[in-house]
Each structure stands twice: as C-alpha cells, then as structure tokens.
Image (cartoon, rainbow, N blue to C red):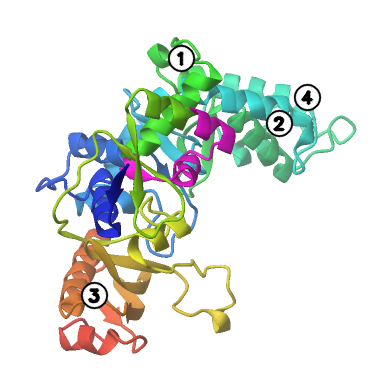
Amino acid sequence: MQSMSVAQARRTALAAQGFLDKPHAEPTMRTFLRTLERTGVLQVDSVNVLQRAHFMPLYSRMGPYDVDLLRRAAERRPRRVVEYWAHVQAFMPVELWPVMQHRMDDYRQTRGKWGFVQVDDELERSLLAEIADRGASTARDLDDGLPRSKDNWGWNWSKTRRVLDYLYTSGQVAIAGRNSQFEIRYDLPERVIPAAVLAQPTPTRAEASLELVRRAARSHGVATVQDLRDYYRMTVDDTAAAVDTLVEVGELVPVSVAGWKRPAYLHRDARLPRRVDARALLSPFDPVVWERARTEALFDFHYRIEIYVPAEKRVHGYYVLPFLLGDRVVARVDLKADRKAGRLLVQGAYAEPSAPAETAEELAAELRRLGGWLGLPDVVVAPRGDLAPALRTLGVAG
C-alpha cells in the first residue's frame, strides 16, 4: 500500500481545493466555474458579520472578484448552480439535480416523520398552486397572499415556511434566488432547473452514490471514508459501497497517511505538489476546514466556531477565520465588517505555535486586500491577541 506523510496529504488536499490555480487579474465566469469544480459545493449560511459564507471560499481561491458572478450563475440563464441540501444548505452544480432525486424521494417518503412540520396536504397543494400562479415567491409573499381561514388550516407564517422547506428538500419546489433581505424565493423546478437537466434519467441510488463519492474524492484529493461521507452528507453504507467500487475500477487508490488511524483513499488524478504558496483567510464554512476532525488531522489545527458560545466563554472570538499561509494554518483572526463606518474590524489576532516569522506581515497584506474587496478601506486592529501589536506596527490601524 502506498504511504503518504501528513505534509504530502495536506498539499494534496489544498491542490484539490484549487489553491494551486493561478488567479486571473479579473476573475471571470470561467474562473468561477473552475473554482466551483474544485470545491464542488458552496455552503450557504445566514451569518453576515463579515461576508456571506458562500462568497468567501471563492474569494479565498480567486482573490477579489465581483460577487455578481455567483448571482449570475445561480439566477440567470443558463443557470450553472442551484441551492439544495447538498452538504448542508449549499450551492451545487445544477447538473447534480438528478443525482439528488433519491435524497428528495427519501424526504418525501419520511414526510410524516418530520418533527418540525405536521402533515398538511391542503396547505401544500395551496402553496404549490400559488407559486405556479404568481411565480418565484418568498414565504412572506405567500403568507400575505394566501387565505387565512383558521377553520380550514389554522396555519401561520412559520408553518408556511416549514412546509416550504419540506417542499424544497423533497424537490417539489426549487430555489430561484434570494431577495435583498436574503429571503429565499421559491419556484417550480421547471422554471428554475434547465429543461435538459430535468430530462436526464434519474440514476439508481448506487449510481448517485458513486457520483457523489467520486466528486467528493476529487475535491478532497486524499480522504478517509468519513471525510468522503461528510462532503455530501451521505450514509456510511452508501459511501462505503461506492468507495469499494471506485477502488475496484482504479479511481481511488488505498493509501496510509502517517498518524491517521483510519485508511485513506487517494484519487487517481490528485496532484501532489512539492509546495503550495497559498495566502488566504478561510471562512468557518470553507470545505478545507468545515470537517473539524479532518482539519486537525491535516493541519494540527484545533478549530471550533464560537458563534453560539456566550461571549465571556469565547477563547478567540465570535467569527474567527483561519489564516492559511503556504500549506499551513498559521494564525486565526476574529473579523467583523463595520459597513456603516467603512471599517474592517480585527477584534483579535492570534498566531499558531508554528507560525513563521513573516506571519504578521503576510496577514496584514491579506487583511488590506480583504478590506478592499469588501469596500472597507480602514482596517482597525483591537489590542487582543499576540499578533495585534505587530499588525499595528505594520501600519494596520489601531
């Protein structure tokens, strides 16, 4: 069996995620599609303390870009991506819609078992009819537009939203986009998904699992079964069966990674570069760090998001981003966008034990670049964390 060092596995993983790609001076739709091919999905999250989660992985790989690229890909013809429960809520390539049909069927079959929404066939029919008639609509639109006879349904806005979420996960409606308040606009799938994609035959469950594991393996480069399972939130049995098939046909190569307790699998097309010269701030929802056990195994970096931790108990801050330099995570920074004042607030900056001497200088440059992209020309560093003094000395404002 082939063996790999952790450093080799780490560089392989970063290469698979697109950190070897040379950025365009001005990222284009081609740049976007190339980057999406590497990440596979872009996790969506409502937290907007810095920038929406789905925009950040693109920035980390492409550099400053026009966020309208993602909106165009998601909302204009020809649609390249669509939101679905792919990892969790995420943008995925639109061609994965048929692959997700079995997942949608599972949600539909377990309809009566959902703890947060009761069966209400009449409300479902009414919502679908209203969407068919009026087009893409938010839950708020539908709440205002539908009759409210308590003798009939006894429903309210929250129930409407829960039923819409069920209709969305079961594939009966699709997400056409979001409004300026980040509210989902639901529409019929035939008005969102390209006709050529809807006309594709539905793969068997085994075929769908094979395709998702294949994509996860390409995005990981090298991974355990658990890593591969988590990427598209699959079952262990479906993942293991697909891995066995891909090993048999030679797409995955069993390897041992030094220090890893579980067997790993290397994608046959994975690149193993001698070095990676990355410099990027990573969102808490970036594929490189979203599976925390993998993050620790690859980078020796213990990472927990502390949004839900009481302020007095937080160790590093509310919205903390790992700082990738070369092929190592060398620091972490707690960031906030003060949009009204045009300031990027560095509320804490901490070096990792193995951080190289140039960490503060490289981080300062990256913070200025990030601020420029976000339209926040002033970078303000609070006196919290061991990197804060050096950042101030380098001219990042205090």
Query: In this rendering, which labeled residue sits more in front, label 2 or label 3?
Result: 3
Residue 231 part of the magenta-drawn span: yes
Tag 3 or tag 4, which sits nearer the N-term? 4
Q: Earlier in the sequence, mark 2 or mark 3?
A: 2
Residue 130 visible in this rendered orientation of the protein: no
Q: Residue furthest right?
A: 151
The CA span between labels 2 and 1 is 29 Å
The residue nearer to you, when weighing 243 against 90, is 243
Distance Cα–Cα, label 2 vs label 3: 47 Å
Magenta residues span 219-241
Residue receiving disc 1? 198
Q: Is residue 205 left or right of residue 300?
A: right
- Dot 1 amino acid type: Leu
Residue 337 location in percent, x, y?
Answer: 36, 68
Disc 4 and disc 2 in contact, CB within 8 angstroms:
no
**In this figure, which residue is indicated by the disc labeled 2?**
146
Give the spatial CA distance, label 1 vs label 4.
25 Å
Q: Secondary structure at mark 1?
A: helix
Categorize mark 3 by other alpha carbons within 10 Å: few (<14), some (14-19), many (20+).
some
- The CA distance from mark 4 to mark 3 is 53 Å
Q: Main secondary structure of the magenta part?
A: helix
User: Which quadrant of the rendered structure holds the C terminus?
Assistant: bottom left
Badge nearest the viewer, 1 or 3: 1
Q: Neighbour class for label 4 at 10 Å: few (<14), some, many (≥20)?
A: few
In the image, residue 9 lies in the stretch drawn in magenta: no
Identified by mark 2, the residue type is Leu
